[in-house]
Amino acid sequence: MGDAKLGDIAGWLVENQNAVLGVLTIIATFILWRFHAVRAHGLDHGGRDVTPIPPILWVFAAGTTLFAYQLGGAAAVELGFATDTVHDRAMQTLLSGIAGTIVGGGLLWFAAREAKDAGLIPKWGDWPIGVGLFLVLYPIVSIVGLMGLWTVRGLNTVPQDRIAHDTLQLIAQHQGDSWVWVLSGVVVVLVPIVEELVYRVFLQSAFLRVFRSRWGAVLLTSVIFAGMHWTVLPDGGKYAIAQIFALSVALGAAYERTGKLGVPIAMHASFNAFNLLVTFLVDPMVQG
């Protein structure tokens, strides 16, 4: 009885998602405008000062962390975790995440000693702010994703997948495998940490240091962030590149607006966790 009601609710939300997201987007836009987040110089409130570190060193930190992340995955393959099973994908992602977190965290420690006002030290109070901002911004990010889907459908290229990410597809196809929980944990915890260090902390700070424009830094970083995710999107899920770009803009803007590193990490983790929740619960209810 309870499952049936939840299934009905999930089905109603999917059927009316455009209207629901439209209303929530209007509310979210009002909230952002009310708190000056989308106004001119609204991102200056965080006051991040990245000038003590030269742009080349910020870029070096981004590249080194990303290389460590990729090296961890390569090491997993060399250790024999080379297939596309849930077990091997979990080990690849786990070793990548550990390597990227260790190297990125070490570089972050050095950077924080030099740039004390760059917002490089996460604090416990950042996490609820990040989750709250995720709830506010998610409708906007989703609307952009739907616009990407409508555009691709209009071009009539290839059939579009409901789940637009190869890792999420793998998880959805093997929900009975216990290694799904390991893979999910890494996607929610380690991947957001590494990606926020690479893109928001290091790369966005480099652009900010060069161009002295917070919105410019956010947008340039988001173009690269979206481009780097292109390869993990299946042919039927390329439309999600619009949502990934919008997510990156939201993460970067939140970082500059608050000046708190834990905020974009919490937002990114919440986004990944929500997508996993949809994959585990909502899709099976709708299909069932």
Image (spheres, rainbow, N blue to C red):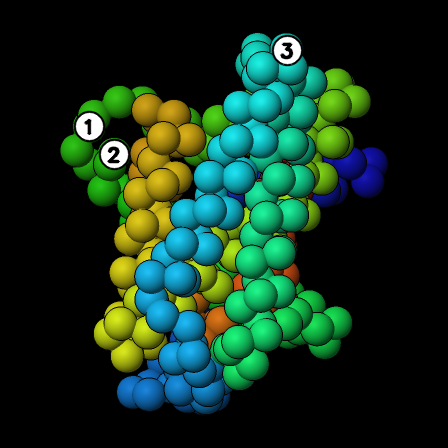
Question: Which badge, 3 or 1, is on the more N-terminal residue?
Answer: 3
Three-letter code for the amino acid on which mark 1 is drawn: Asn
Is residue 3 rendered to the left or right of residue 285?
A: right
Q: Mark 1 touching mark 2, by CB under 8 A?
A: yes
Would you name the residue on which mark 2 appears? 153
Question: Which badge, 2 or 3, is on the more N-terminal residue?
Answer: 3
> Where 168 sits versus 104, above or below?
above
> Where 206 sits versus 19, above or below?
below
Q: Residue at x 61, y 21 (%)?
A: 76
Q: Mark 3 touching mark 1, by CB under 8 A?
A: no
Circle 3 packing at 10 Å, graded few (<14), some (14-19), many (20+), is: few
Looking at the rendering, in which quadrant would you find the N terminus?
top right
Would you name the residue on which mark 1 appears? 156
Is residue 217 rendered to the left or right of residue 16?
A: left
Looking at the rendering, in which quadrant would you find the C terminus?
top right
Total tally of numbered discs in the picture: 3
Three-letter code for the amino acid on which mark 3 is drawn: Gly
Seen as rendered, the residue at the extreme left is 155
Please indicate, yes or no, whether residue 12 appears anywhere in the rendered image: no
Which type of secondary structure does the marked residue at label 1 adopt? loop
Three-letter code for the amino acid on which mark 2 is drawn: Arg
Would you name the residue on which mark 3 appears? 80
Q: Place residue 231 in its image quadrant.
A: top left
Frontmost residue, 205 versus 147:
205
Q: Position of residue 79 (x, y in %)?
A: 64, 15
Circle 1 packing at 10 Å, graded few (<14), some (14-19), many (20+), is: few
Q: Position of residue 125 (x, y in %)?
A: 72, 76
Which type of secondary structure does the marked residue at label 2 adopt? helix
